[in-house]
Every structure is written in C-alpha cells, then in structure tokens.
Image (cartoon, rainbow, N blue to C red):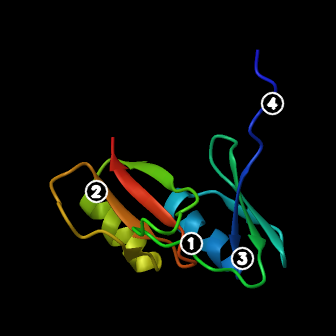
Amino acid sequence: MALAVLDAVVLDCPDPRALAGFYAGVLGGAVEGEDDWVDLRLPGGRTLAFQRAPGFVPPKWPAPEDSQQFHLDLEVADLDAAERGVLELGARPLDTGDRSRGWRVYADPAGHPFCLCAC
C-alpha cells in the first residue's frame, strides 16, 4: 500500500511563468498562476510546477563533480521533429554525440537537463 500520491514535480527557476510556457509548448497543458509559483496542468491530470528561486544556479551536465539533481525523460514519436520543436522553444542541446541512439539530451531555458526519448 502506497503512503502517498505524487502531486507535482516542482522545478526551481528564475522566471516561473517563462519556464512554464516553455514546458507548455513541449507538453501541452494550461499554465496557471503568477509571480513566485506557477503550475502547468498537463493533459492526463499531472502537474509540473515552477517556483522562483532567488540565486538559482542551473545544474551542470555532464559534470562528474557536480550533480544534475534530476532530469525529465519525455517520450516522443519522432526524435528529429521533437528536437526541432524544443530548439524553437528555447532548449539547447547538451549532448550532440551519437545520433543513432534512442534519446537526446537538452537543457530547458533555465538550464535543467531533460531527455527526448523515442517511444
């Protein structure tokens, strides 16, 4: 029996509304809230939330001496099309290595790493 139910995944960032807008462009959903806390209500009922963090320092990837803290794996049907889309929304590639594997690594506009993964 579970002790809890996951309510939201929360990302620290310098501009919650801007980062919520980025992820809304990637994942769909509705952006709700202002100022220091913004929710992205995703299709299917999940919530990705963003909170303002003064002095935010983005994670480093790859950096063995620094932790990335966490990353999101996002399933996509077409890696090339999804890559074009996230780059247009403001992501930047973190790993331009082997293009034949089934995943690619990017940073969102605040610097959090995420992967696009072929389903």
Nearest the viewer among 88 and 103 is 103
Lower sequence index among marks 1 and 3: 3
Q: Amino acid at mark 1?
A: Phe
Residue at point 49%, 73% (across, down): 60
Residue ID for mark 3: 17
Q: Secondary structure at mark 3?
A: helix
Cα distance, mark 1 to mark 4?
29 Å
Q: Amino acid at mark 3?
A: Arg
Lower sequence index among marks 2 and 1: 1
Residue extending furthest top? 1
In this image, 51 relative to 22: left or right? right
The spot of residue 24 in percent (x, y) is: 59, 64
Q: Is residue 5 above or below residue 60?
A: above
Lower sequence index among marks 1 and 4: 4
Evaluate if marks 1 and 3 touch, with contact meaning CB atoms under 8 Å apart.
no
Residue ID for mark 2: 79
Label number found at residue 22? 1
Residue extending furthest bottom? 55
